[in-house]
Amino acid sequence: MRQGRTEFPGLVLRQHPDDGSLDLIVFFEAEDIIWEQRVRPKSLQQPGHCWTHVQPIEGELTMDQIAALIRELKQQMYGDYEAPNKSMIEYLDDFDKRLQKLERK
């Protein structure tokens, strides 16, 4: 339990076929992320420290639908311009560092 919460999102890295357990990356908070190995499914014998299936928010998407969403997002972000080689966050971080240098002068 963290801050009164008992359920947290996780990213599945691997499923073990022998017992159905999962290796997960668990996201407690933005900077509180851990790697858990062999987490077992929830059951009467395993009521805590377990994983459960969740229902998708908007249903399952096909790969074609995901690709279309990515194209749409790129169009919204970049318009007619070519997508840059680095992520937007890297450019913003670089810009922030340049501003900090200017403020020191």
Image: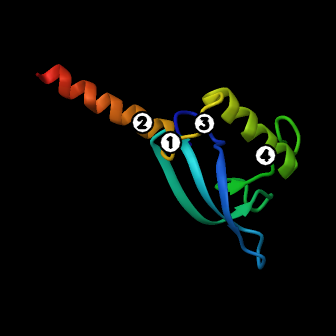
* Residue that numbered label 1 is attached to: 87
Return the residue nearer the eye: 8 or 31: 31
* Residue that numbered label 3 is attached to: 5
Return the residue nearer the eye: 89 or 8: 89
Give above or below for 62 relative to 18.
Answer: above
Q: Give the CA distance from mark 2 to mark 4.
A: 24 Å
* Horizontal side, residue 92 vs residue 8: left or right: left
Q: Position of residue 41 (x, y in %)?
A: 76, 60
Q: Quadrant of the rendered structure where residue 20 is? A: bottom right
Q: Give the CA distance from mark 4 to mark 1.
A: 18 Å
- Residue farthest left in this picture: 105
Point out which mark residue 91 bears.
2
Give above or below for 53 relative to 78.
Answer: below
Secondary structure at numbered mark 4? helix
Earlier-in-chain disc, 4 versus 1 = 4
Q: Amino acid at mark 3?
A: Arg
Secondary structure at numbered mark 3? loop
| Marks 2 and 1 close (CB-CB < 8 Å) | yes
| Marks 4 and 1 close (CB-CB < 8 Å) | no
Write the residue at 62% across / 29% down. Answer: 77
Q: Amino acid at mark 4?
A: Ala
Secondary structure at numbered mark 2? helix
Q: Amino acid at mark 1?
A: Ser
| Marks 2 and 3 close (CB-CB < 8 Å) | no
Q: Position of residue 7 (x, y in %)?
A: 66, 42
